[in-house]
Amino acid sequence: MKRNRPKYKQIIDAAVIVIAENGYHQAQVSKIAKQAGVADGTIYLYFKNKEDILISMFQEKMGYFVEQIQEDLKGIHKASDKLSVFIHKHFKILSEDANLAIVTQLELRQSNKELRMRINDSLRGYLGVIDEIIQEGIENKEFSDSLNRKLARQMIFGTIDETVTTWVMNDQKYSLSDLAPEVHRLIIHGCGRPTD
């Protein structure tokens, strides 16, 4: 499978850098090839075109995120603690890769509607983790049983996403990870957790 071949990952990582530095529309395949240290033609052994690179990049990075978060959630039983780990991990991964943060928060939003729809398909696994946490929270009586699950998922994702976007727009001048406890607290209260 091409995803397991070293050059595939090399090209994906190069694409993150080139798109972050030049913007998606100015990120030519030749620039990505140069950054990856491969011939232009090599790119087409793995990807159909630049759009395919962007979609594959997002799928790869979201897949990595979901794997990492599921690993970190092992052995944690409370939904509120799982949500805390989820937020911290999301912020940590993006704060450690400034280029990836720029691409996910800014460049993906500028792509055309069809491309965005295909990228949104890659979010399913990520959103599924949020759904599981919400469900567990309701079952454990940590969250209100009248909680609108779909709206709660949108609120959680939207809050995390907007917090990262604001951080990127402010040139990453402050610690994103330091915001995780407050974001967690606000979300937990929004989910109707009973007061202690």
Image (cartoon, rainbow, N blue to C red):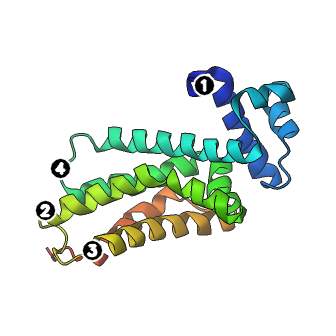
Indicate the amino acid at tag 4. His
Indicate the amino acid at tag 1. Lys
Q: Closer to the camera: disc 2 or disc 1?
A: 1
Dot 4 surroundings within 10 Å: few (below 14), some, or many (20 or more)? few
**Relative image position of residue 30 (x, y in whole percent):** 87, 37
Dot 3 surroundings within 10 Å: few (below 14), some, or many (20 or more)? many
Q: Closer to the camera: disc 4 or disc 2?
A: 2
Would you place residue 63 above or below residue 111 in this image? Answer: above
Task: Residue at 83%, 40% (x, y): give it.
Answer: 29
Quarter of image, res 72:
top left
Q: Using the image, tell me which numbered label, if any, was put on residue 191.
A: 3
Quickly name the residue at label 1: 2
**Relative image position of residue 41 (x, y in whole percent):** 84, 27
Q: CA distance from mark 4 to mark 1?
A: 37 Å
Task: Residue at 71%, 61% (x, y): give it.
Answer: 111
**Residue 106 as seen in the image, left or right of residue 77:** right
Quickly name the residue at label 4: 77
Indicate the amino acid at tag 3. Cys
Label located before the other in sequence (1 or 3): 1
Quickly name the residue at label 2: 139
Quarter of image, res 17:
top right
Q: CA distance from mark 1 to mark 3?
A: 42 Å
Label located before the other in sequence (4 or 2): 4
- Asked if the residues shown at circle 3 and circle 4 are in contact, with their CB atoms under 8 angstroms apart, the answer is no
Q: CA distance from mark 4 to mark 2?
A: 12 Å
Label located before the other in sequence (2 or 1): 1
- Asked if the residues shown at circle 3 and circle 2 are in contact, with their CB atoms under 8 angstroms apart, the answer is no
**Residue 34 as seen in the image, left or right of residue 125:** right
Q: CA distance from mark 3 to mark 2?
A: 13 Å
Q: CA distance from mark 3 to mark 4?
A: 17 Å
